Image (spheres, rainbow, N blue to C red):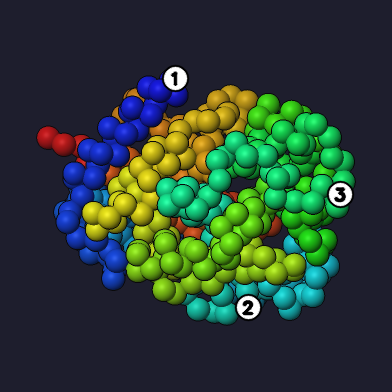
Amino acid sequence: MKKSLWCLAIGMILCSSSLLAQDHWPTTDWHVAAPDDVGLDAAVLSAFDADISRRQYGYVDSMLVVRHGKLAYERYYTHDYNRVYQKEATTPGPLVVRHPTGPYNYFNAWWHPYLKKGNLHSIQSVTKSVVAAIVGIAVGRGDFPDLDTPVLTFFDTDTIANVDDSKRRMTIRHLLTMTTGLEWNEDYPYSDPRNSFAIMALDPNWVKFTLDQPMALEPGEAFQYNSGATLILGDVFTKATGMDLEEYAVRHLFTPLGIDNFFWKRTPFGLTDAQEGLFLTSRDMAKIAYLFLRKGKWQEKSIVPSTWIDTSVSPLVSASEDGTWEYGYKWWLIHYQYRGEQRVAFAGLGFGGQHLIVIPELDMVLVFTGWNIRSKGPRLTSTEAIKRVLEAVIAPT
């Protein structure tokens, strides 16, 4: 589908879905409804719940289904992560970064997946999708520069390695779409020391490490997943707005949505960790997705510009060779089958099993969290999650 047609279609879908939602806004908390009240088969959802409980999908921590603005299904699953990852937590490796008692030991159950055994869950790279929303707010408020501004405008090029004309052409837009052209390979498992993220994690200054990489392609030429690109974006945000990314988020995103319980890790250099550092409750994750479902409006007030929402969830770049995965502004577009037709959902996805999924045509938000961080083992994919939940949708008569 051409981009213009996609934008028109997604705009119509999001607009119509907002009309279906109830007037209740979950600023204080979600309105809870029985599955049958929002057109979902409770027995089908319970069967999915049972498979999760049997660990058919490894370690899933939560499952939430929101439809028509109501929380229709909510389950949490308890795992003894101290026991599950006891050996890995004390074994040096790419996922045990710096001191093993610190926040970058991903097997350390004091920090992951729940923060200090509370109800705040690491959302990992769903953080990137949240950061894109914050950038959109700043653009709408006139606090952020044009997206075609060269990235190096914000840095002293005398301190950056491998600067050439190609790197000078890298823009903020390329950071948003993961098309920087920088040499980077995050396709290896995160437990593999060849993974560019694993190498970066050992450096104290993650932004400089990423910017120092040589150029492998012309900016905009191709998608290459690069967590460091979002760290650069976070640094640019602070430099451009004069405000800490986290503080800006609190003022203009979290407070309007009623999100007052969160934690945001810092990089070793002290910056807000824009690529994976945010911890939220599952219910508050759903608020972020619901904001996007409602085209950036909350209690009839525009939080994120609707034009930014439309672009963020448009297929700006292909993210897979077969075209089944596409990417916007740090949101994934997922093609799936429903009742014999090809459909598209959009999602924020994170390491370990974090899924923040919006299905506009069915006025639905799905949240799954988990902690499947070994390179092998069963796990829940976003396509499987969509398939299982949509089996519960009751066809209109």
| Residue on which disc 3 sits | 158
- State the image coordinates of residue 2 (x, y, percent, origin top left): 44, 20
Residue 76, compared with residue 342, is above or below; it is: below
Quadrant in the picture for residue 339: top left
The kind of residue on which mark 2 rests is Trp
Alpha-carbon neighbours of circle 1 within 10 Å: few (<14), some, or many (≥20)? few
In this view of the protein, can residue 191 be seen by the observer?
no
In this view of the protein, can residue 175 be seen by the observer?
yes
SS category of the residue bearing label 1: loop
Of circles 1 and 2, the one toward us is: 1
SS category of the residue bearing label 3: helix
Task: Tell me which label, 1 or 2, sits earlier in the chain.
Answer: 1
Marks 1 & 2, CB-CB < 8 Å contact: no
| Residue on which disc 2 sits | 110
- State the image coordinates of residue 41 (x, y, percent, origin top left): 24, 49
Choose between 149 and 368: the one closer to the eye: 149
- State the CA–CA distance, disc 2 to disc 3: 41 Å
